[in-house]
Amino acid sequence: MQDLLQPDQRDAMCEETIKAMLDCLIPGDTTGWPAAGQHGLSERFLELLDSLFEQADKYLEIMIAELPDDFSALSTERQTACLSSIESTQPDAFEAVLKACYSAYYTDPHIRQILEKKTGYEARPPQPEGYHLPPFDESLLEPVRARGPIWRKVP
């Protein structure tokens, strides 16, 4: 069995299929979002797939085996249909690949910069820096305090 997670075990066609698969899962658009495969996330995707899932090699092998050899040359509609079929017949493999693809995409520094630019929010983990919050307004608790307890005391 070939370990497709290892670069020396993949041929050019397999590389193109992975890239096309990522592009189909996150296609990008004309507003500045790049497609996942075209953005060069194949290696990061494979690293995350391997680290997140015990059966990563099996899942990737299933995906590659189920896709037609000319997958990268198919129209977007046909690629989507192929992936939808795999989603129905091999849900575990599809879910693993999708999660690794999303993880690779949304943790990429360039994608996070785009996200920050488009939303105005810092695209970073909330910890350890945290986010600035306004001081807590104690008056918000007044209605709760005025209502009194709404539970029974345990003896």
Image (cartoon, grey):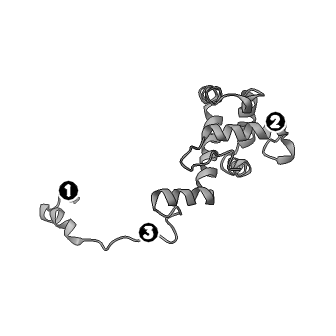
Q: Nearer the viewer, residue 69 or 128?
A: 69
Secondary element at image label 1: loop
Q: Which residue is mark 1?
A: 151
Q: Which secondary structure, mark 3?
A: loop
Between 47 and 25, which is closer to the camera in this rendering? 25
View extreme (right): residue: 8
- Check contact, mark 2 vs mark 1: CB within 8 A: no
Please report whichever mark, 2 or 1, sits nearer to the chain's N-terminal start.
2
Q: Identify which residue, 106 or 113, lies in the foreground.
A: 113
- Kindly indicate whether the residue at mark 3 contacts the one at mark 1 (C-beta within 8 angstroms): no
Residue 31 to residue 94: above or below: below
Disc 2/disc 3 C-alpha distance (Å): 45 Å
> Looking at the image, which is closer to me, 30 or 106?
30
Q: Position of residue 85 (x, y in %)?
A: 62, 25
The reply to whether residue 62 is visible in this rendering is no
Q: Nearer the viewer, mark 2 or mark 3?
A: 2
Numbered tag placed on residue 13 in the rendering? 2
The picture places residue 48, in percent across and down from the top left corner, at: 68, 51
Say which residue label 3 marks. Answer: 131
Q: Quadrant of residue 60?
A: top right
Crowdedness near tag 3: few (<14), some (14–19) or many (≥20) residues, C-alpha within 10 Å: few
Instruction: Give the number of the mark in front: 2 or 1.
Output: 2
Q: Quadrant of residue 94?
A: top right
Q: Amino acid at mark 3?
A: Tyr
Q: Amino acid at mark 1?
A: Trp
Task: Determine if residue 154 is in view.
Answer: yes
